[in-house]
């Protein structure tokens, strides 16, 4: 069932609560990267330019002590938002009580208010982690502050917290609309559709350190994909399961049986590296070389080799949908970045395909390569996009009203 979108609701003269993802890297009050603030602008602008009052909620980091509260206030984020929008943004240093309620009552149409970090509620009271444990009275309190709720925070969609799910449930109980923001809409459209109704040929590329992190994704996507290409550290447990020598490469002994099962289930669909860039040490300063399938006992595989890159490209040719999650090697070190860079470039060149990068390191690699505008969709959520690819119901999305 399609979800209600912010553009479906009448926002004029309405107090619209918007759950954004302002969980930006911040140190000493200085924002390291404002991508997430920029990504929230279309939804905020839609509401304010159409005569609504935008009341923004977000978490920032994890709050365990009063010291964390000093470091993780949203005040600098509100200031950055004001700079980006070139208009006043009111910051309220609380997220419950009279100061907040008075500030909301004083808002005019088109105004923007940012309330303090929702996770301050995790230590501020005698009731435990009210935000992170989805305390229903907190969700109901926030819902009572507005006429509609828009959830644009995909990054937390895999969590049921008071500021996403609690508010949504209370809003719906009061017959008020709960809609997805534009960022959330894109995630549902691209990641959700790739998993639920992929246009074939559909190729999944998985990498990164551990098989254990990606088991759910592999199991969910084997039946749906035409090929699953596996690189990165996780490939070595599969290669070991096939009886290859993997030397000192990353290896999860307790996942070998599972790897065998997945290999049997997937058959020719599952494609593994056929050569490797190896080194004796996990270091960019140590000598490295390309070897075939079997890795000498004192070496470790740190990237896929050129023949594997060529094989993966061959499998990607003609693809109509591609999902990529996880680097092909220890790409932070330049000697072992080639496989990840080549696969990123290949995705960028597939103009006939819907290409989706599922957050985390592969998203960072694509952005670093300047490929962001050549990829159909780079997911903003690491954990959330992995759980989405696993086929799980994300509570933050499930709680949005259907159209
Ligand atoms: P993940 O967080 O699971 O996506 O894993 C990403 C991390 O896996 C990156 O920091 C990579 O350096 C690391 N990685 C990828 N391939 C290898 C490999 N062959 N050996 C060791 N680490 C790897």
Image (cartoon, grey):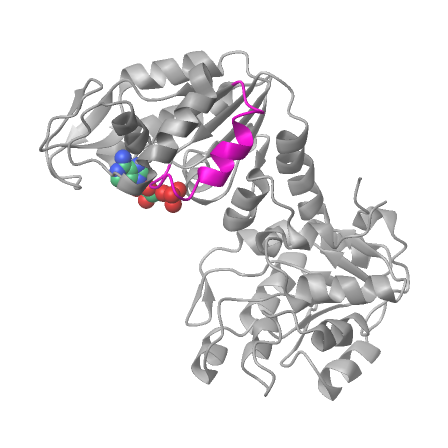
Image quarter where the C terminus lies is: top right
Judging depth in this view, the residue of 73 and 167 nearest the camera is 167
The x and y percentages for residue 233 are 30, 36
Judge whether residue 15 can be spotted in this image: no
Judging depth in this view, the residue of 18 and 388 nearest the camera is 388
Using the image, determine if residue 40 lies above or below residue 161.
Answer: above
Q: Indicate yes or no whether the magenta region holds residue 218.
A: yes
Magenta range is 208-226
Using the image, determine if residue 196 lies above or below residue 119.
Answer: above
For the point 68% across and 41% down, the residue is 188
> Can you tell which quarter of the image residue 207 is in?
top left
Question: Magenta segment, principal secondary structure?
Answer: loop
For the point 67% across and 46% down, the residue is 183
For the point 61% across and 17% down, the residue is 200
Looking at the rendered structure, the number of numbered marks drawn on it comes to 0
For the point 57% across and 53% down, the residue is 155
> Can you tell which quarter of the image residue 13 is in?
bottom right
The x and y percentages for residue 374 are 54, 28
Image quarter where the N terminus lies is: top right
Judge whether residue 37 can be spotted in this image: yes
Q: Would residue 103 be found to the left or right of residue 198 on screen?
A: right
Q: Would residue 350 be found to the left or right of residue 297 on screen?
A: right
Q: Indicate yes or no whether the magenta region holds residue 181.
A: no
Using the image, determine if residue 49 lies above or below residue 236.
Answer: below
> Can you tell which quarter of the image residue 90 is in?
bottom right
The x and y percentages for residue 258 are 38, 34
Judging depth in this view, the residue of 338 and 191 nearest the camera is 191
Q: Would residue 22 be found to the left or right of residue 310 on screen?
A: right
The x and y percentages for residue 209 are 33, 41
The image quadrant where one finds ligand 1 is: top left
């Amino acid at each position: 069932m399609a979800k209600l979108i912010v553009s479906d609701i009448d926002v004029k003269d309405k107090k619209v609560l918007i759950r954004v993802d302002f969980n930006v890297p911040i140190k000493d009050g200085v924002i390291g990267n404002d991508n997430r603030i920029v990504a929230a602008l279309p939804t905020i602008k839609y509401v304010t330019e159409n005569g609504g009052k935008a009341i923004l909620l977000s978490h920032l980091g994890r709050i365990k002590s009063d010291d964390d509260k000093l470091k993780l206030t949203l005040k600098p984020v509100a200031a950055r938002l004001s700079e980006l929008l070139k208009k006043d943004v009111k910051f309220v240093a609380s997220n419950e009580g009279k100061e907040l309620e008075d500030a909301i009552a004083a808002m005019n149409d088109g105004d923007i208010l940012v309330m303090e970090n929702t996770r301050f509620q995790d230590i501020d009271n005698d009731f435990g982690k009210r935000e992170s444990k989805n305390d229903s009275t907190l969700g109901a309190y926030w819902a009572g502050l507005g006429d509609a709720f828009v959830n644009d925070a995909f990054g937390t969609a895999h969590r049921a917290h008071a500021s996403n799910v609690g508010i949504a449930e209370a809003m719906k109980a009061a017959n008020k609309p709960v809609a997805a923001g534009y960022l959330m809409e894109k995630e549902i459209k691209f990641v959700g559709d790739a998993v639920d109704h992929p246009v074939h040929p559909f190729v999944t590329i998985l990498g990164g350190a551990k098989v254990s992190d990606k088991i759910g994704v592999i199991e969910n996507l084997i039946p749906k994909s035409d090929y699953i290409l596996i690189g990165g550290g996780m490939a070595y447990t599969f290669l070991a399961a096939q009886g290859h020598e993997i030397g000192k490469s990353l290896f999860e002994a307790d996942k070998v049986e599972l790897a065998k099962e997945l290999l049997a289930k997937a058959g020719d669909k599952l494609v593994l590296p056929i050569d490797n860039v190896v080194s004796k040490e996990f270091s960019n300063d140590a000598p490295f070389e390309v070897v075939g399938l079997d890795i000498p006992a004192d070496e470790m595989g740190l990237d896929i080799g050129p023949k594997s890159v060529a094989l993966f490209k061959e499998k990607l040719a003609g693809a109509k949908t591609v999902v990529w999650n996880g680097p092909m090697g220890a790409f932070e070190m330049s000697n072992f970045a080639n496989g990840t860079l080549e696969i990123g470039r290949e995705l960028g060149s597939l103009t006939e395909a819907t290409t989706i990068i599922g957050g985390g390191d592969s998203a960072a690699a694509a952005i670093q390569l300047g490929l962001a505008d050549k990829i159909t969709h780079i997911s903003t959520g690491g954990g959330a996009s992995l759980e989405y690819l696993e086929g799980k119901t994300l509570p933050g999305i499930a709680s949005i009203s259907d159209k």
